[in-house]
Image (cartoon, grey):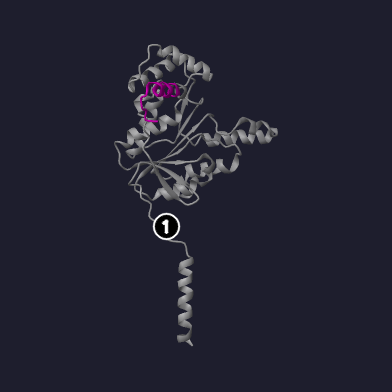
């Protein structure tokens, strides 16, 4: 009887092996410095190096100094803080996060950046647990972070930063950019009753309090805007006799001054002059 069953059992075992998913390949971070994380598959997709140099970002020297100093402490195994870069749109929050990383990563081969989508914040605890056992040191970046729906994502972020019973991973630095100092929209609070509004306000503060380093980016004044335009123009060899006037007209058409508006003007000027740019 056993001899008769063995071929059948062998065929069943082979069929189950074919149905089983393939073993996950060991993740390698050796081929790149920047990665995007896909929580659905757990994969880390390499991305090209960020091309904008840190020194080309003008008007935000104080912010650059703080971000770089915190990054260097983290890369060197010293105490550090998670970072919230907040302020008006277009002031260079995302650019400084990536450019500062590239500057410090040039000194440390084991430093990597993993970008996560703001709609996938609930996957952060699992991601942090995956990175905890790695020999590399990771900056996890979430751009334009906010909690439009509130509780689930906010709780996931707090859980990731606190690390549960095992504590936060020592090799992960979380950096978020946001247009809001407190990450939940005010309308979400105002639409509810008094007690619920108070609870939501406490929740807002409790999320933001997980970031030890808050760095603000105020609106850009005219001299700083023109300095940004002139700095870009000099760096990329762009010449125009009426550079300031044209830059101010460009900002007026855009309805405001910012580092992003300055860079968009420079892109337009470079295209007009037939000069290539890194972005």
Mark 1: which secondary structure? loop
- Please state the horizontal and vertical placement of residue 41, each as a whole percent of the image: 48, 52
Q: Quadrant of the C terminus?
A: top left
Highlighted magenta segment, given as a residue range: 263-279
- Residue at image x 67%, y 36%? 196
Residue at the right extreme of this rendering: 193
- Residue at image x 38%, y 31%? 99
Residue under label 1 = 24
Q: Is residue 240 above or below residue 271?
A: above
Residue 192 occupies quadrant: top right
Q: How many marks?
A: 1
Q: Is residue 267 magenta?
A: yes
Residue 205 occupies quadrant: top right
Q: Is residue 244 above or below residue 52?
A: above
Of residues 17 and 138, which is closer to you in this image? Answer: 17
Residue 206 occupies quadrant: top right
Of residues 272 and 113, which is closer to you in this image? Answer: 272
Q: Is residue 172 magenta?
A: no
Mark 1 is surrounded, within 10 Å at the Cα level, by few (under 14), some (14 to 19) or many (20 or more) other residues, namely few
Most frequent secondary structure within the magenta stretch? helix
- Residue at image x 41%, y 32%? 97
- Please state the horizontal and vertical placement of residue 61, each as a whole percent of the image: 38, 22
- Please state the horizontal and vertical placement of residue 167, each as a whole percent of the image: 45, 46
- Please state the horizontal and vertical placement of residue 240, each as a whole percent of the image: 37, 14
Q: Is residue 120 above or below residue 22?
A: above
Residue at the bottom extreme of this rendering: 1
């Amino acid at each position: 009887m056993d001899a008769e069953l063995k071929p059948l059992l062998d065929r069943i075992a082979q069929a189950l092996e074919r149905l089983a998913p393939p073993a996950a390949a060991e993740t390698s971070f050796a081929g790149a410095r920047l990665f995007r994380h896909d929580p659905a598959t757990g994969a880390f997709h390499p991305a090209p190096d960020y091309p904008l140099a840190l020194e080309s970002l003008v008007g935000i020297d104080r912010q650059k100094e703080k971000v770089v100093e915190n990054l260097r402490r983290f890369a060197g195994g010293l105490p550090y803080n998670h970072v919230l870069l907040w302020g008006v749109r277009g002031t260079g929050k995302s650019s400084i996060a990536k450019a500062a990383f590239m500057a410090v990563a040039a000194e440390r081969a084991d430093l990597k950046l993993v970008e996560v989508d703001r709609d996938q914040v609930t996957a952060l605890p699992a991601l942090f647990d995956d990175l905890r056992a790695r020999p590399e040191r990771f900056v996890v970046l979430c751009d334009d972070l906010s909690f439009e729906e509130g509780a689930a994502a906010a709780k996931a972020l707090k859980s990731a930063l606190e690390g549960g019973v095992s504590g936060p991973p020592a090799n992960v630095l979380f950096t978020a950019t946001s247009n809001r100092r407190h990450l939940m929209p005010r309308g979400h609070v105002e639409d509810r009753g008094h007690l619920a509004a108070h609870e939501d306000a406490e929740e807002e503060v409790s999320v933001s309090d997980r970031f030890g380093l808050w760095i603000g980016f105020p609106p850009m004044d005219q001299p700083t805007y023109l300095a940004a335009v002139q700095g870009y123009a000099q760096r990329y060899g762009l010449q125009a006799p009426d550079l300031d006037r044209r830059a101010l007209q460009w900002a007026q058409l855009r309805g405001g001054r910012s580092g992003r508006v300055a860079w968009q003007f420079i892109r337009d000027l470079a295209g007009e002059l037939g000069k290539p740019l890194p972005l």
